Amino acid sequence: MIQQILNGLIIGSMYALVAIGFTLVLGVLDRLNFAHTEIFMLGGFVGLVVIQAGGPLWLTLPVAFGVCGGMGLVVELVCFRRIEGDARITAALSSVAAGLIIDDLLQKVYGTDPPSLPLPGYITDAGVRFLDTHLTYLDLLIVGVTLALMLALQLFVARSRTGRAIRAVADSHVAASLLGINVRRVTQQVFFLSAALAGVAGVLYALRTDIANLQAGLTFGLKALAVMAIGGMGDVRGAVIGGLAVGVLEGLAFYWGLGGYSDLVVWIAMILVLLVRPAGLFGGGVHVRELRA
Amino acid sequence: MLRPMALAAFIAACLPISAALAQEKPPIKFGNIAIMSGPAASSGNMEKSVLDVAVEDINAAGGINGSKVIEQTEDAQLDPGQAVLMYRKLAAENAVGVIGPVTGTQWQTVAPIAQQVKVPAATVNAVASGITVRPWTIRLEPPDDVIIPQAVELFLKKFPAVKKVAIFADSGESSTLNAANLFKSLAKKNNLEVVGETVGFTGKTMDLSPAAIEIKRLDPDALWGSALPPQQLLLAKALAAQGFDKPKLANNIFWPGNFVSTVGEAGKGWYIPGFSTNDKVFGDNARYQGVSKRIIERVSKIPGTGTNISQATIAYDTAMVYADILRKAGVDGNTPIAQAREKLKDGFLALKEYSGLNIYKIMPDGDGDVKQVLLIVDVPSGQWKFAE
Amino acid sequence: MIPDYVFFTCDNILLAWSVYAVLLSGNLSFAQAAFMSIGCYAAGILTTQYGFPFYASIPPAMALSAIIAILFGFPALRIRGIYLILVTVGITFIVRVALENMTITGGVHGLFGMSGADQWDAVGAVILVGALLYMVSRSPLQRLLDVVREDDQVAAGLGVNLTYVKLVSFAAGAAIAALAGALYGHYLTFVRPSNFDILVSIFCALYVILGGINNMWGPAFGAAFMTLLPEFIRALQGWRPTVFGVAIIVLLLVRPDGVLPFRTLSARWGRRG
């Protein structure tokens, strides 16, 4: 059982990473980027390309960060730039369409069976023992990278100049622009960051499951959105705690013999949480925003 | 005034001659419903390539009583609604018979409709039992309830010391769930202990590490079960990551496709039932050498398809069965289509056994029976080979 | 062949309208696949296990779907915006798993033996529902829905019971989806829970966005266009999602309100509302 919990924490940290990206765009920019899940999936393929080109393992992370971040910029430009105000729902759906396209194009290039990521054994087999469980170095890498990114994000938003600009825009676009902040630039930066995080999560996920999977967006990615809802819109802490909790619960579902329902865990948890706290666990904390569909 | 008349007379004289020259028999059309796009398109590409080779061979042997065979392929993707649409389309476009559709759901949807539309159909891939409907449909592929008992018998002969078995299943999919339940009941019949509940997951589960951890915890002597190819691959890798090294038996659902070429070391210890490899069949092996080369040549040109022929030999044999029946019935391209279809259907009913690349017995319910052997992954080549 | 095209086009139009019905009160629902499946299975069980004639099985199926919509909707519709969208996604998954685990539905093995629907039934359904929607659009109800959708704080200030209106609209959408589902099942003769995947929900929402969200013709156009387009352009067959996606993005850039963006004439004022 401990094993399932530890395993769940590892999976959960990947959920958290994807959820953070989504919640960032939502909390700061009040936008729903449904292409987020497909960018997560794209990350896995970027990692595949790097490894197939003979690059070292560590290179996959920064490359995915950059490429997927760039994709985020593209999505912002194509789907969100022109649309303001109450047409936000159409922008969101436009991003769904963008996601579909990314998915289909990748399918055309890579064919249909998920390609395998050739990984060196030292990372997938060797590891340490902790609480009677075998944790591979890859598992540790995943947790490490996730923690590092979360910390970095936290510091970035709190300390850096861009971070301050982001917080200003989050409070109010109008006030921020009055203060001379280039809102469009900030928008781009946030989209970039969010997508970059999703991309890294995608690489980690692909490394863990050993394949670059076209279905990852609609399965894993969609669940990460539910995680975000559990944690609360715009709240990074919520995304992390929600992600870890869901990861552990899914693992425990297998322990209790309910593996067939493990995918439902997150949706039921989300509905239950929203019934009790309609803004999510930590919603209404930093960003109180009335959301209109 | 003579010239136009002479010209007209000349043309009039030519007409019967040109008509006689054009007196080649109209072709006979075989329809093919396969998955040509979407996540499972590689299977469709393989199947079409095999059929192309079969059609070539039929035509090289003189076609069907002088009429060439042509093939029309339609894409059903993974949608039973599309399968029905494509079946009706091929019926409307004068296919004498249809090969396909492929998945269990699609076959289950089309087989009853075939009785009304009255166009013969034969699936080459579906393994769920009890869904072939006579007389208008037939299946050379043995169903799971014929394959799995043979597989279990072979496995237990190889591993007589097995006492405890764990079962895994994709519980969200009818054919895998049925297969896993069949494994379970066969385990009990053989006086083996089934440890734990069936470890279930769905076709949407992408991370099978919790399942693998649970299976390891149950500590069985062997693992039996069934899952769709993507989950099967993930499970194999997750089990390897957990260090689970007991022998594993599954049904043949991932015999086709790229499991064998991508699983690598994690494929060790997996056994599946099958009846051929890329190099050898138990039927007309001499002919197969040439046929398999041509198939691989065609298929190598289509990206993402891989060269694992697996059970696509059934598609070849099915086309040959059609051609045989029609030839013997004296059908050619001039036969009215309804009559040609009747003849094909009658041939289905009369078919008791067939020897092609593989050797088939046809059972009373319209399904095939082929003798099974155990196959394992040959890691260096990424192909299946016979287990010794 | 042609009957099949007619049938599936009409069925998709109904699904698009079911999304539209919910959109009228300002909510986007990704749960229509779930309600479609409820309608399909309910009608199917009635016809295959209780001997109902096909037409008689439809009203109970629609009613059941509407009731379940109200049950889900009552707590959910007080949640706003994206949360609601995600809840509707959750509903789709939950209903599907529920169907897979009930013996009466045949579970993952599916339900078969349904029959009795043909393309004329689908056309008839489209005409019926279309007429209903048209009547609504010319009635005071349309104004009410407009207010609730556009600015619900004003609506609340005017004494409108928001939750009630949204629930009715959600239930209506569920009922229409159920109708589409009953037709679908009795046409295909065999369904499994996996026929009602989340992608179905996503697609029918996209039909509406493509066609235009401000009136009832838009969704119908979007559904018809996307169903028939791959048939007309052979080369595009394998590229359906990309074509769909590009069409939507381009359209939204050029005409953010969809292809047919005009609002329906208000009966009362006789001019664009």
Image (tube, coloured by chain):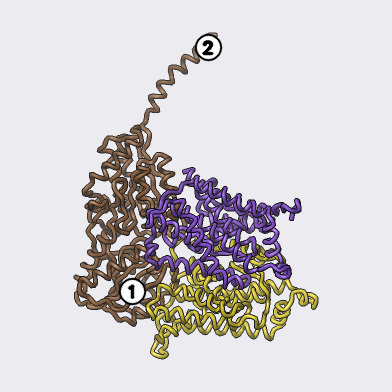
Chain colours: A yellow, B brown, C purple
* In front of the other: A103 or B116: B116
State the quadrant of the N terminus of chain A: bottom left
Q: Residue at x 54, y 77 (%)?
A: A227
Question: Is A250 displayed left or right of C19 in the figure?
Answer: left
- Chain ID of residue with mark 2: B
What residue is shown with label 2?
B3
Quarter of the C terminus of chain A within the rendering: bottom right
CB under 8 Å between discs 1 and 2: no
Amino acid under disc 1: Thr
Q: Position of residue C39 (x, y in %)?
A: 48, 59
**Local SS, label 1:** loop
Query: Viewed as shown, does residue B146 lie left or right of C5?
Result: left
- Judged left or right of residue A39, residue B56 is left
Which of pointers 1 and 2 lies earlier in the amino acid sequence?
2
Query: Which of the pair C215/A74 is nearer the observer?
Result: C215
Determine the CA span between mark 1 and mark 2: 91 Å
Q: Under tag 2, what secondary structure? A: helix
Of all chains, the one bearing label 1 is B
Can residue A127 be seen at all in this image of the molecule?
Answer: yes
Kindly identify the residue that appears in the image at 79 percent across and 78 percent down.
A179
Q: For this rendering, which residue is in front, B151 or C220?
A: C220
Q: Amino acid at mark 2?
A: Arg
- Residue designated by label 1: B198
